[in-house]
Amino acid sequence: MQHRFRTAVSRIASILGLVIVSSALIAPSANAAERKRATVKKVAPSATASTKKTADRRVAVTLRSSDRQVNDRRRVSAKAGVRPVKASAVSRAPVVPAKLSFGQMAGLHEVSDPLDLKSSVALVIDQDTREVLLSKNDHAVLPIASLTKLMTGLIISEAKLPMDEPITITQDDVDTEKGSRSRLSVGTTLTRGEMLHLALMSSENRAAHALGRTYPGGLATFVSLMNAKARMLGMTDTRYVEPTGLSSQNQASARDLATLVNVAHGDPVLRELSTSPSYEVAVGRKTLQYNNTNGLVKNPTWDIGLQKTGYISEAGRCLVMQAEVAGRKLIMVFLDSAGKFSRLGDAERVRNWVESARAFGAPKMTAQKGSHG
């Protein structure tokens, strides 16, 4: 009995020992795991902070790189002279309506004619017989633009002034009315003959003004002589206020201009200079090339003895010519033509009409004046 009791106690003691040993072994592991979890909890914030710092460093590097690129672009732009473009509202230039000519305002373009001319005023006369072949609004008094220079040239030529006398362009010769350009800068010196050539052939405004300004007695005397010559020739519709034609106050009728063309054609200097296809002048170290404003003078099918073109907005496109067509010496006047090349087209239409009339043996070639319609 005692033996069984001792055996049972011994077994219980063994079991208790195993339990104690197991507890001892398990406790350190649990504590280690707990410490590990605690360590992880403490380390996690550090890792997050480290990651954030790394990200911040990357952002900072990116920003610094971007700043360097911007600064580099600015330095390159500065070296190239390019300024940064700032965004701004798009501005549109105001639409300026085309300025009407005096002929358009007077309704002269509403007058029709058999040749469908684009000029509101036209007159074609046989120079020898004075027969009027075609007339359209020929009594209308309109601005004549640079056709003025034909009278300027006539006064200079008839004065017999020395053509080799030097004339210098001054500020007084600069156009302040229309703001037209000129290659003859202030200080340019040419001879009177060269100035006259450029005025008649290429319609050089500063050259024409300088011719009048340097005339004995000055500009006022010169303009007075222009008007006196017009009266002497019976040009009762004509008035001049300056020698270039830039002023719309320089006005005349087609009939008066036909008279002027007839007289000017009798001057060999005006014939030669006005029909010259091109001309060169030496200005300092440069040589300037000028061309005739009338392209027909270079056309070998035309026989032109004298010509002058003109244009300001108030006058429209203008042209006067003396030419031989179909064996007849004709004086042609075209005023207030609509379109850059229409005045030359009108001259071609008249020539074709005259040549056709001769081919068909028509005794007279008088176009009837159109009517308003």
Image: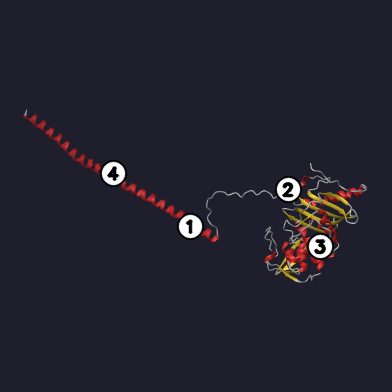
The reply to whether callout 3 and callout 1 are in contact (CB within 8 Å) is no
Residue at the outermost left position:
2
The reply to whether callout 4 and callout 1 are in contact (CB within 8 Å) is no
Nearer the camera: disc 3 or disc 1:
3
User: Residue 75: image x %, image y %?
Assistant: 50, 59
Query: Regarding mark 1 in the picture, which secondary structure is present there?
Result: helix
**Camera-nearest residue between 64 and 347:** 347
The residue carrying mark 4 is 41
**Camera-nearest residue between 105 and 194:** 105
Query: Regarding mark 2 in the picture, which secondary structure is present there?
Result: helix
Q: Quadrant of the N terminus?
A: top left
Nearer the camera: disc 2 or disc 4:
2
Nearer the camera: disc 4 or disc 3:
3
The residue carrying mark 1 is 71
The reply to whether callout 2 and callout 4 are in contact (CB within 8 Å) is no
Q: Earlier in the sequence, mark 3 or mark 1?
A: 1
Q: Earlier in the sequence, mark 4 or mark 3?
A: 4
The residue carrying mark 3 is 229
Q: Earlier in the sequence, mark 2 or mark 3?
A: 2
Q: Identity of the amino acid at label 3? A: Lys
Q: Earlier in the sequence, mark 4 or mark 1?
A: 4
**Camera-nearest residue between 145 and 277:** 145
User: Residue 23: image x %, image y %?
Assistant: 18, 38
Q: How many marks?
A: 4
Query: Regarding mark 3 in the picture, which secondary structure is present there?
Result: helix
Q: Residues within 10 Å of mark 3 (few under 14, many from 20)?
A: some
Q: Earlier in the sequence, mark 2 or mark 4?
A: 4
Q: Is residue 275 visible?
A: no
Q: Identity of the amino acid at label 2? A: Met
Nearer the camera: disc 2 or disc 1:
2
Q: Residues within 10 Å of mark 1 (few under 14, many from 20)?
A: few
The residue carrying mark 2 is 105
